Image: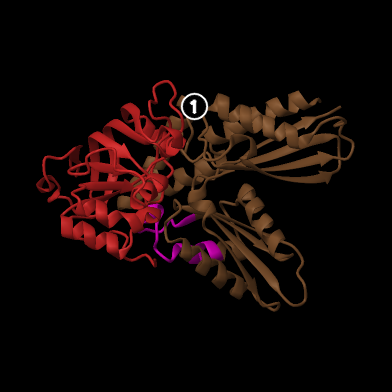
Chain colours: A red, B brown
Amino acid sequence: MYLRLKQIEFPVSSPESLKNLKAGDEVLLSGVIYTARDRVHRLVAEGRAEWPFELKNNAVYYCGPTPASEGFPMGSCGPTTSARMDKWTAGLYFRGLAATIGKGPRNEVVRRSIKDAGAVYFSAFGGCGALYGSRVLKASVIAFDDLGPQAVYRAEIKNFPVVVGIDPSGNNIFENLKF
Amino acid sequence: MNEETFSGKLSEEIINSTRVVPGSLKDAIEKAAAEAEGLEKKVLEKIVENCRIASASRVPVCQDTGVFEIWLNIGKDASVKGIDFSRAVSAALKEAHEKGGLRRSMDPEIAGAVHISFCGGAAVEAIITPRGFGSENYTFLRSLPPGASDADVKEAVIEETAKASARPCPPYVIGVGLGGTASSAVELSAKALTEIDFSPSGLEKEILDGINLTGTGAGGMGGRFTAIGIKIKRMPAHIAGLPLCVHVGCWCNRVSVFKIETD
């Protein structure tokens, strides 16, 4: 039996668009997403910077890409380990962020904040930088250029394959992992 | 061989190591993908597709092009007079980052951890492995008691691997260093990652099977392919202890090797 994969386009019009997602679903993501990883999260948490894009209904991708090359506007750009961002994540969902995209398990605080917001966490396929790079149509640095790979990129993506890690009801595919 | 020749070749192989995964690893992933089911099969199929794109398009397999762990084995009869190996490695790392589109996760010229040893022959051999920090962060050192049995080693390696909790990228490859001092155990397990056995036997097989019983699975999404390869490297140990180091490597375990005859 072949089931058509669910598709989500960012930004979403409202969290309603996410309500049919179930933990373990394979989903293809398209539209516009923004990268942010350790350094930018820390700068914002310390009050030294503001988020350089609208959080509401948008998606943050935990990624530090390699430089662009021909046909790969955001180079090799797979997900980084989400757990490192856990301590800064709940506040983003509280402010209306629709999704985070990274790899691997999240802690209980993040899981609850996702449930409270009716938002989602997508786990992308780890180590697959070339694959994700081939699904980026356009990319540009919009802030923190001086941070190199940790800069915030705005990326237009088409058919990013991911799995629903934590769904809007708080179901978590990683719940059996010792963490 | 002069310094420029060596540096140029090293730079080329550093770039290559980020593009193409070793054949034995590729075969093991493809075999697992054929046998796996459900979501785990999807994860493994995506990895296969990723390796194909990286090799065909010459982009890094993984965006974390890492810190380069480099072992240089210098033959006792090699003509290396006048070669400053530290300078050559720095130059190679700098050139590889500039030409190879590698990620600047740190200052390129110092993005290497170099181990030099001496051997017979007239060649210089280099073993290169880019270490991404998704896995390097999950390197565990502990001290086992001197009389530790194979069963104790097995239990310890499985426990330490479980601590990684799918934060690196499973299916893992497991490097184990056993014996010597704490620092030599760490170096042994790092080196073990360059010698991974994908069809192990004996204790290595027992450990691999034990890790796979945890059910973490490829991508951490559940399944039976938590790890696909392992290597234990040993040194004799002091009568009062047995240092153990476990490197939990991502599936994306990149290794390049080259040898230059200097005659």
Along the line of sight, the residue nearer the viewer: A92 or B217? A92
Q: In the rendered view, does A8 fall on the left or right side of B55?
A: left
The image shows residue B202, relative to residue B135, as above or below, that is below
Q: Position of residue A140 (x, y in %)?
A: 34, 27
Estimate how packed mark 1 is, as few (under 14), some (14 to 19) or many (20 or more) residues with alpha carbons within 10 Å: some
Q: Is residue B210 magenta?
A: yes
Residue B155 falls in image quadrant:
bottom right
Query: Where does residue B220 sit, x and y in percent of width and height?
Result: 38, 56
Residue at the outermost front position: A48
Residue depicted at x 46% and y 45%: B29
> Magenta part of the protein: which range?
B207-227
Q: Position of residue A83 (x, y in %)?
A: 38, 56
Residue shown at 55%/40% (left/top)?
B106
The residue that label 1 is drawn on is B58
Extreme residue in the right direction: B77
Nearer the observer, B232 or A2: B232
Horizontal side of B229 relative to B168 (left or right) equals right
Quarter of the figure with the C terminus of chain A: bottom left
Secondary element at image label 1: loop
Chain letter of mark 1 equals: B
Judge whether residue B201 is colored magenta. no
Q: Nearer the viewer, residue B257 or B6?
A: B6
What is the total number of numbered labels drawn onto the structure image?
A: 1
- The image position of residue A96, as x and y in percent, is 18, 49
Q: Tell me: residue B175, above or below residue A153.
A: below
Q: Quadrant of the N terminus of chain A?
A: top left
Rendered residue at 64%/72% (across/down): B143
Given residues A37 and B119, the one toward you in this image is: A37
Give the side of residue A77 with respect to residue B203, left or right.
left
**Residue at x-position 86% and y-position 29%:** B82
Amino acid type at image mark 1: Arg
The answer to whether residue B231 shows anywhere in this view is: yes
